[in-house]
Image (spheres, helix red, strand yellow):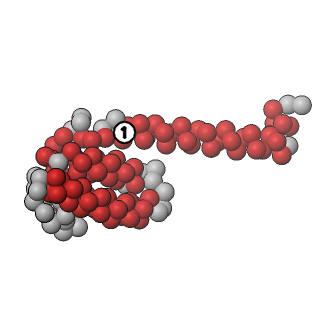
C-alpha cells in the first residue's frame, strides 16, 4: 500500500487531519509563546503602561483603575494577565469570539481589582 493509498482509508484521512491540526496548533503555540514572553510588560514596561492608560481611557475606568495602579502588586498581576489575554484575543490568529471573550474577562478582572483594593484598604484601616 502506498502513502496515497493509505491516505484514502478512513484511518489515513484521520491521520492526515491530525497532522494538519498539529501543524496549526504548533503555529498557535509559537504565537502564544511570543505573547507570554512579554507578559507582565517586563520586556516593554512603557508599552504595558501605555496599554493600561489606553484601556482606562477607552472604557472610562479611571474610577476602577487608579493612576497609581503600578504600586499595587495585585492590580499589576490582574492587568498583566488581562494584557496577555488582550494580545492573544486581538492577534491575527484569534478566533471570532476571542475579542468578545476578552471583554468578558475585562469585567471579571475589574471585579477582582475592586476586591483587591477593598482588602488593601481594610488592611490599612481605611474602611
Residue 73 x %, y %: 21, 45
Q: Residue at 82% of width from left, 42% of height from top?
A: 11
Residue 47 x %, y %: 20, 45
Can you name the residue that lies furthest to the bottom here? 60
Q: Residue at 80% of width from left, 40% of height from top?
A: 12
Q: Secondary structure at mark 1?
A: helix
Quadrant position of residue 62: bottom left
Is residue 11 found left or right of 110 in the rendered image? Answer: right
| Vertical arrangement, residue 13 with respect to residue 95, above or below | above
How packed mark 1 is, by other alpha carbons closer than 10 Å (few <14, some 14-19, many 20 or more), is some
Q: In front: 127, or 100? A: 127
Is residue 54 found left or right of 82 in the rendered image? Answer: left
* Figure quadrant of the N terminus: top right
Q: Can residue 53 be seen?
A: no
Q: Residue at 42% of width from left, 62% of height from top?
A: 101
Residue 20 x %, y %: 64, 42
Q: How many marks?
A: 1
Is residue 5 found left or right of 27 in the rendered image? Answer: right
| Vertical arrangement, residue 50 with respect to residue 18, above or below | below
Q: Residue at 19% of width from left, 64% of height from top?
A: 64
Q: Can residue 60 be seen?
A: yes
Residue 93 x %, y %: 46, 50
Which residue is identified by label 1?
36
* Figure quadrant of the C terminus: bottom left
Can you name the residue that lies furthest to the top here? 2
Quadrant position of residue 54: bottom left
Q: In front: 114, or 32? A: 114
Is residue 4 found left or right of 32 in the rendered image? Answer: right
Amino acid at each position: 500500500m502506498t502513502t496515497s493509498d493509505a491516505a484514502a482509508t478512513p484511518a489515513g484521512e484521520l491521520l492526515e487531519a491530525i497532522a494538519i491540526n498539529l501543524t496549526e496548533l504548533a503555529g498557535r503555540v509559537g504565537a502564544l509563546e511570543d505573547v507570554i514572553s512579554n507578559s507582565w510588560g517586563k520586556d516593554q514596561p512603557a508599552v504595558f503602561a501605555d496599554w493600561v492608560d489606553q484601556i482606562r481611557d477607552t472604557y472610562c475606568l479611571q474610577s476602577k483603575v487608579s493612576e497609581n495602579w503600578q504600586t499595587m502588586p495585585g492590580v499589576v498581576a490582574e492587568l498583566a494577565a488581562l494584557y496577555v489575554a488582550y494580545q492573544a484575543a486581538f492577534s491575527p490568529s484569534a478566533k471570532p469570539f476571542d475579542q468578545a471573550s476578552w471583554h468578558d474577562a475585562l469585567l471579571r478582572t475589574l471585579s477582582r481589582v475592586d476586591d483587591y483594593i477593598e482588602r488593601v484598604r481594610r488592611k490599612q484601616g481605611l474602611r
